[in-house]
Image (spheres, rainbow, N blue to C red):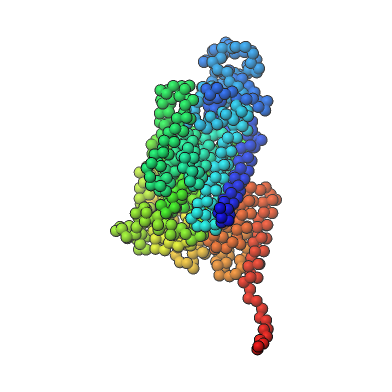
């Protein structure tokens, strides 16, 4: 194996390890917090209880740990409980007929005796199996409880391990695909973007908070992204099996199965390969469900499974804050996992929007490089699936569902920027569109996608997406109370940008379009919120037209592109990074940052002090680096990303170290570009 191949593998491994460490540190700090190690968190009450009950069906027994060993006795009725319960029993439960005696001596007529950790006080919890979801995640939780112990630390071990492995595998897949398409430089660029966004996407108000708890999403995303990694490495059987296992933890895992089916069709175009994959999926499902079939019988299990599928299309009773799919792109209210400490699962709208735009661009190029479909199809498929569920009648969707899709949004953004940096994305898009049979020579498409038709395409997109939103009920609330039209803006931006780029598909234009899509949207939303206070009916149609004009700024000309992108990028960084600063600070920061980056394009040196002071987000520095093709910004960007995982004063030290390193590199570059002094040269005539 050649040196280049070994170098590429080393780069993939290093980025995977770095992302795994960053994500793992956050997961441990969140879910293994001392205040959370003695209680259930959120939906753990259902999944852990079901896992404990399934242990008895599987012939396993949970082990006590940490001194928290109880025997819970369940009865058919409160009267039976009061008549037969042992005298040392504690009446802990209200919602179900059960008591907590310790120790248990003798028989007391209980219908079930359960060890070890206290059950939650929920109706019929002693027999609950959570059959509305597939059983694999509960099997894994139950096995951990029987091998290691029935306490929160061990409930969460399988899910947190799989989540960290999944993020590491996805980062490896991201870098691997970028290297395959654009070389080592593209892989390094994609890895840096992915690493920065993984760091930015953590926090107690982020979707990453889900990863460490004993709920279904960490299992689904962990197995799903391992499946994508196996597919990218050419391991078809492993990919299909892992995708099937992901779906067997929660039905939303079907998006990974669909992504692998798409990749398989694009890469082999053979029905036999797809058929073999489907057979593997069926076999995996049969093996996973076999214990339940043996315990319950096929008829009851089939009935429970059908009821579970119907349950997915039914709204829940009033309770936690619910969302519609638009909220996940607009920064709607998050799902509170814990009150103390406060942990809210809320997706990052900038990551979701930039990921959606990048995914659509990469899907266009997927026929030219089928592995792009692995990461580019996850977020669009997930949003489509959840929209169909919403239309089907379930209007109580929760933000933590997005934990399955947000890592893919990070990966798509990273790969798209990496390929832009290497200058190969335009050619891939052209080849892909030809394979998709979407060419500018086809009648109406040519007129819409030409330079004169771009504004018309943008307006038609606004009207079409708005009509779709109103027709499905997703845009039912007025803009003054909830800016749901932001999805309209995002969709419009994608189509308008595609139309504008048709004329000139070059790396800088594609990169700047993604910049505008990813970073201008939240800033534009603030403007929309201000305008929406007018509560005029025409705003529903007119407001979305504001965004294409913002997205088009970077595409105006080569000379003005950098300044426009810098204004958008740094204005958002200041808005997102500082709580309620004075408006004049936004303006000054944007102007200073724009001037800084603008000067950097035409001078051999850059005033990094100004850049570091203005750059609140690691992703901002990374994007500026790739936009300017200036490696001097990578060091402060990486250290800025690292600072998100550090406590003060170490975070400040990391930022200052990045600034110092950048200044040193800058000085070296300046010396290299300084002309040498003139010297006297004596000429001798031979």
User: Residue 200 versus residue 23: which sits nearer the camera?
Assistant: 23
Position of residue 500 relative to residue 290, above or below, is below
Residue at 44 percent of width and 32 percent of height: 283
Q: In terms of image quadrants, where is residue 342?
A: top right
* Residue reaching furthest to the left: 443
The C terminus, quarter of image: bottom right
- How many numbered discs? 0
Answer whether residue 400 is visible to the viewer in this image: no
- Residue at position x 69%, y 54% in the image: 653
**Residue 363 point in image, percent of width and height:** 42, 51
Q: Report x, y in % for residue 94.
A: 56, 21
Residue 2 visible to the viewer: yes
Q: Nearer the viewer, residue 657 or 315?
A: 657
In the visual, does 643 lie left or right of 175? right
Q: Residue furthest top?
A: 83
- The picture quadrant where one finds residue 680 is bottom right
Q: Position of residue 21 (x, y in %)?
A: 62, 45
Task: Please determine whether, in this image, residue 138 is positioned above or below residue 383.
Answer: above
What residue lies at 35% left-to-right and 55% top-to-bottom? 438
Q: Quadrant of residue 297?
A: top left
* Residue nearest the observer in this picture, 167 or 66: 167
Q: Residue at x 59, y 42 (%)?
A: 204
Nearer the observer, 631 or 43 = 631
């Amino acid at each position: 194996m050649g040196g280049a191949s070994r170098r590429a593998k080393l780069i993939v491994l290093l980025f995977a390890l770095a992302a795994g460490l960053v994500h793992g540190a956050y997961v441990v700090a969140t879910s293994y917090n001392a205040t959370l190690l003695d209680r259930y968190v959120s939906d753990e009450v259902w999944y852990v209880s079901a896992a404990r009950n399934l242990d008895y069906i599987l012939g396993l027994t949970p082990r006590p740990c940490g001194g928290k060993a109880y025997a819970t006795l369940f009865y058919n009725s409160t009267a039976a409980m009061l008549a037969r319960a042992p005298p040392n029993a504690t009446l802990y439960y209200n919602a179900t007929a059960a008591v907590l005696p310790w120790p248990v001596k003798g028989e007391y007529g209980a219908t079930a005796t359960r060890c070890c950790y206290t059950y939650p006080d929920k109706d019929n919890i002693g027999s609950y199996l959570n059959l509305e979801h597939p059983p694999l995640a509960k099997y894994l939780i139950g096995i951990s409880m029987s091998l290691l112990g029935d306490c929160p630390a061990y409930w969460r071990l399988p899910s947190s391990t799989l989540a960290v492995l999944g993020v590491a595998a996805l980062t490896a897949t991201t870098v691997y695909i970028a290297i395959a398409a654009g070389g080592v430089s593209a892989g390094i660029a994609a890895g840096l973007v992915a690493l920065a966004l993984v760091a930015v996407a953590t926090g107690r108000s982020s979707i990453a908070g889900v990863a460490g708890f004993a709920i279904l999403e960490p299992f689904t995303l962990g197995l799903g992204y391992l499946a994508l990694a196996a597919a990218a490495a050419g391991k078809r059987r492993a990919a299909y099996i892992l995708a099937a296992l992901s779906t067997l933890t929660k039905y939303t895992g079907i998006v990974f199965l669909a992504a692998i089916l798409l990749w398989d069709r694009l890469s082999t175009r053979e029905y036999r390969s797809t058929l073999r994959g489907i057979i593997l999926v069926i076999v995996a499902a049969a093996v996973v469900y076999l214990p339940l079939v043996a315990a319950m019988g096929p008829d009851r299990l089939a009935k429970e499974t059908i009821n579970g599928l119907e349950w997915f299309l039914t709204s829940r009773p009033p309770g936690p804050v619910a969302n519609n799919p638009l909220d996940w792109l607009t920064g709607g209210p998050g799902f509170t996992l814990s009150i103390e400490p406060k942990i809210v699962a809320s997706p990052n709208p900038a990551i979701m929007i930039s990921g959606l735009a990048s995914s659509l661009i990469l899907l266009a190029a997927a026929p030219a490089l089928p592995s792009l479909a692995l990461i580019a199809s996850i977020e669009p498929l997930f949003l489509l699936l959840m929209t169909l569920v919403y239309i089907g009648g379930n209007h109580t969707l929760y933000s933590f569902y997005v934990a399955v899709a947000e890592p893919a949004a990070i990966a798509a953004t990273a790969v798209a920027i990496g390929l832009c940096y290497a200058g190969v994305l335009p050619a891939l898009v052209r080849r892909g569109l030809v394979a998709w049979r979407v060419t500018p020579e086809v009648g109406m498409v040519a007129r819409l996608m030409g330079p004169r038709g771009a504004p018309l395409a943008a307006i038609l997109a606004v009207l079409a997406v708005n009509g779709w939103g109103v027709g499905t009920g997703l845009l039912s609330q007025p803009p003054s109370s909830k800016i749901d039209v932001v999805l309209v803006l995002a969709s419009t931006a994608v189509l308008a940008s595609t139309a504008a780029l048709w004329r000139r598909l070059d790396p800088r234009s594609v990169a700047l379009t993604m910049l505008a899509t990813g970073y201008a949207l939240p800033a534009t939303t603030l403007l929309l919120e201000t305008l929406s206070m007018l509560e005029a009916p025409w705003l529903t149609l007119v407001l979305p037209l504001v965004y294409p004009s913002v997205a088009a700024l970077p595409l105006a000309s080569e000379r003005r592109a950098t300044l426009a992108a810098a204004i958008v990028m740094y204005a958002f960084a200041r808005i997102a990074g500082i709580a309620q600063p004075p408006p004049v600070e936004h303006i000054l920061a944007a102007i200073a940052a724009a001037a800084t980056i603008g000067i950097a394009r035409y001078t051999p040196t850059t005033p990094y002090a100004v850049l570091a002071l203005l750059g609140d987000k690691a992703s901002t520095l990374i994007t500026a680096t790739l936009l300017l093709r200036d490696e001097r910004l990578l060091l402060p960007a990486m250290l800025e990303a690292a600072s998100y995982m550090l406590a003060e004063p170490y975070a400040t030290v990391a930022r200052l170290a990045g600034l110092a390193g950048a200044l040193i590199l800058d000085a070296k570059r300046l010396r290299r570009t300084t002309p040498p002094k003139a010297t006297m040269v004596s000429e001798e005539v031979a």
